[in-house]
Image (cartoon, rainbow, N blue to C red):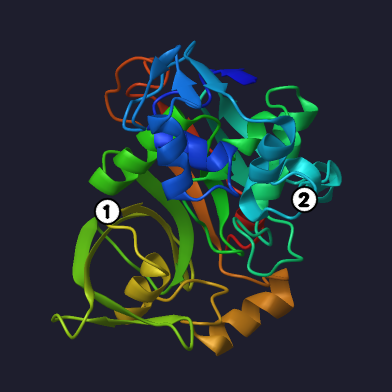
Amino acid sequence: MYQKIITERDAGQRFDKYLHKLLPEAGSSFLYKMLRKKNIMLNEKKADGSEKISCGDVVAIYFSEETLQKFMGNGKDAGQNTPAKDFPMSSETALCGISVLYENEHILLADKPAGVLTQKAAKEDVSLNEWLTAYLLKTGQITQEELRTFRPSACNRLDRNTSGIVLCSKSVSGAQMLSEELKSRGLHKFYRLYVKGILTGEQTIEGFLRKDERSNTVQISDGKKDDASYIRTRYLPIRQERDKTLLEVELITGKTHQIRAHLASIGHPLLGDYKYGDRRFNEQYRRTYQVEHQLLHAYKIVFPPLCTPFEDISERTFYAPVPKIFDSVRT
C-alpha cells in the first residue's frame, strides 16, 4: 500500500486532478475504475474523484509495488510529472540575476532581469521556471517527491527583454488565487518605460489587438477586426527629457506585446524596441548608452483585498527596483 498525506502545497484541487499528476501513466478510465473498486481511497473512504482535497487528507493506493512504480512513471521519462531530474540545481546559479522580492507559503514575487526567459522557448532553455524549482529545492521548501503532484511556476509572462516582477506559485492555492486575480483584473500591474517623443498628461488609450502567430507580432487598430481583442492602456508621464518621456503605464488589459505595440501605434514607440520601434532612434541610444533592448520594466504590483490564507498580501503594494540603465540614459 502507498499512503500520502496531503500538504498545504497540494490542497484545494480536485482529487482526480491530483491523482492524474501522482500517477501520470494511468489513464482516466483506469483511475475511475480503481476509485469504484476502492483500490484508491481518500481518508479511508470510497471517493469518486470530484472531492476537493484539503491539507491533512490521507490518500491510500492499494497497488502492488511494481504497478505503483509503473503508473508513477518511475524509470522512464514521464514528461512534466517526473521529479526534479530535469531541474538541475545549477539552474539557480545559471540565472543568478533573479532576486526574490517577497515570498510566503503560497506565492513568490521574483525580479527578473532583461535577457531571461519566463518560460522555456526550446527544450534546452533554462528559464525562470527552472530557477524557481531549483531555488525551492535548495532552500528546502519543496522535495522531489512533492514535484510529482505540484510544479511551481510563473503565473504571468514577461518578454525575454522585459525586466521586473513575475508572479510565481508555490502551492495549488497560490496558483489558483493568482490565476483568478489575473483573469478578473483584480491585480493592478504598473510598468516604467521610456518612449520616443514628448507626452504630457495622464491618458487612457483604447484599441483592438490582433496577433500574427507566424511573425510573433501584433497589430493595433481602432476598430474590431476578425479575432482582435479589446485593449486598454493607461499612461502617466513621470519626466519629459530632450527627445523622450519616462512613463508609468498601467496594463489594464494584458495581451501579448500590448504596451509596446499600443504606444508605437500612437507615435511613441519604446526606446530600444526593434520590433515595433524607431530604428534610427534606437541606434542612437545603442551607440551612446549601449541600449540593446526595450527599456520596459514591470515596476509595481498592487494586490486587491484577499481572504485567508492570503491576508498577509491583501491590499499590499510591491516594487521592483528600476534597472540602472534607466538612469544611464537620462538626458
Neighbours of disc 2 within 10 Å: few (<14), some (14-19), many (20+): few
The x and y percentages for residue 80 are: 63, 51
Task: Name which residue lies at 69% across and 46% down.
Answer: 73
Asked whether residue 98 is in view, the answer is no
Question: Where the N terminus falls, by quadrant?
Answer: top right
Is 156 drawn above or below residue 178 in the view shown? Answer: below
Is 58 drawn above or below residue 223 in the view shown? Answer: above
Quadrant hosting residue 69: top right
The residue pinned by badge 2 equals: 86
The x and y percentages for residue 178 are: 39, 38
Q: Nearer the viewer, residue 23 or 82?
A: 23
> Could you tell which of marks 2 and 1 lies nearer the N-terminus?
2
As helix, strand or loop, the secondary structure at mark 2 comes to helix
Asked whether residue 124 is in view, the answer is yes
- Residue extending farthest to the left is 223
- Residue extending farthest to the front is 37
Quadrant hosting residue 330: bottom right
Amino acid type, residue under disc 2 in the picture: Asp
Amino acid type, residue under disc 1 in the picture: Ile
Is 265 drawn above or below residue 53 in the view shown? Answer: below
* Left or right side of 216 for 180: left
The x and y percentages for residue 152 are: 59, 39
Neighbours of disc 1 within 10 Å: few (<14), some (14-19), many (20+): some
Q: Nearer the viewer, residue 290 or 35?
A: 35
The residue pinned by badge 1 equals: 252
Task: Name which residue lies at 42% across and 48% down.
Answer: 29
Task: Name which residue lies at 44% across and 69% down.
Answer: 195
Q: Nearer the viewer, residue 281 or 214?
A: 214
How far is the residue under mark 2 from the one under mark 1? Answer: 36 Å
Question: Where the C terminus falls, by quadrant?
Answer: bottom right
> Do the numbered discs 2 and 1 sit on residues whose CB atoms are within 8 Å?
no
